[in-house]
Amino acid sequence: MRLIMIDEYNDKTMQLARPVYDRHRRVLLAAGRTIHPKYLERLRQMDIKYLFVDDFISEGITMEELMDMPSWMEATEIVQKAFEDVKANKPFNVRELQKLAVKLVDEVSRRKMIIIIPSTSLAAELRPYAHAVNVALLSLQLGKQLRLNGLQMHDLAMGALLHDIGKAVEGDEHHAIKGFEYLRKNREISLLSAHVAYQHHEAFNGEGAPRKVRHKEIHQYAQICGIANRFENLISEEGIPPHEAMEALMAKSNIDFAQDLVRLFVNTIPSYPPGAKVKMSDGREAIVTKIVNHMQRPYIRYLSTNEEISLAEKPNLLIISVTDKDKK
């Protein structure tokens, strides 16, 4: 299995590895089938940008680092319900979100690493909620590396899940302030979680929003969420490959984000996830098959010979680029 951009899909060589859902979270296209051109066009009209596929070159790649799709969709549904309740001026179910936070903390704690399912693999109506789930997963992965305790991880998860709740209160403008004002009135939500919503657009150099605070005036949880938010937007909305998204984050070290947190994030989230087609420094093309111990030194399989090697054992062999899109 591997993740591709929708324009790379080839109905002669690929079939769906994971279902495609419509805006009501119903299965639109089931796994294990090919996509007829007219349905492919419908997916484009829904602005779905990514697909999970099985093909010859991805044989044996499990991508077990992904959260399973039903659990991810359930998490997205819980966040959606909370946002819709807030938009309708109704109290949202804090307990359900707290249970979800516990599940996500457990999901991250028992895995060596997490690879997110891009929110743009869903219909546009579901993306804001899938985005929140992804930001929470990425934030928790960084929190785990920082050795946050259980309560801290829970507060971080709640803050990340609700970092954009202000958009349900009063649209995109001033959503950080509106989200904070809304959350801090709820006694079941930690003030630290509320500050994630408040400060996730602040910048390390003091040029962010809404208050232009800087350095340690920005709570660590908010900085973590800010990094995760930027990375998820780069991957999902802008369609940038993970290694380029990492480079974009590193370019913002000590500008938008604290350098130590960016460095830890880069060492925590893989730049070349399983299924990525890459060109090696020896001129040959390969596919990333798995990541064992070294996040940036995965196992690769040469496409020409099917030979699989660990880059951790070949220090002079480097990934120099992600290869061009598949030619149909």
Image: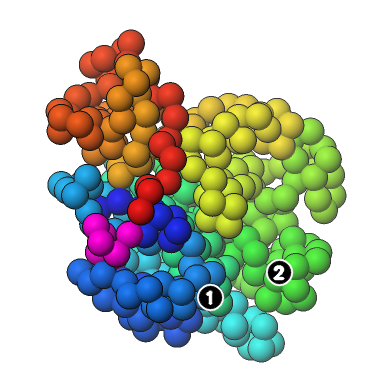
- As drawn, the label of residue 78 is none
Is residue 312 within the magenta segment? no
Residue 234, position in %: x, y?
A: 58, 48
Residue 268, position in %: x, y?
A: 42, 35
Give the class, few, some or many, for how many residues have Cα within 10 Å of label 2's Cα (few <14, many ≥20): many
The dominant secondary structure in magenta is: loop
Q: Which residue is mark 2?
A: 166
Query: Residue at image x 74%, y 32%?
Result: 255
Magenta residue span: 10-18
Would you say residue 86 is visible in this rendering?
yes
Residue 282, position in %: x, y?
A: 32, 17
103 left or right, relative to 260: left
- As drawn, the label of residue 45 is 1
Residue 192, position in %: x, y?
A: 63, 54
Would you say residue 154 is visible in this rendering?
no
Q: Amino acid at mark 2?
A: Gly
* Mark 1 element type: helix
Query: Residue at image x 48%, y 62%?
Result: 49
Task: Determine whether 38 is above or below 108 in the image.
Answer: below
In space, the residues marked 2 and 1 are separated at their CA atoms by 28 Å
* Mark 2 element type: helix
Query: Residue at image x 80%, y 45%?
Result: 208
Task: Determine whether 272 is above or below 239 in the image.
Answer: above
Task: Determine whether 237 is above or below 37 in the image.
Answer: above
Residue at the top extreme, as displayed = 316
Q: Amino acid at mark 1?
A: Gln
43 vs 310, nearest the viewer: 43
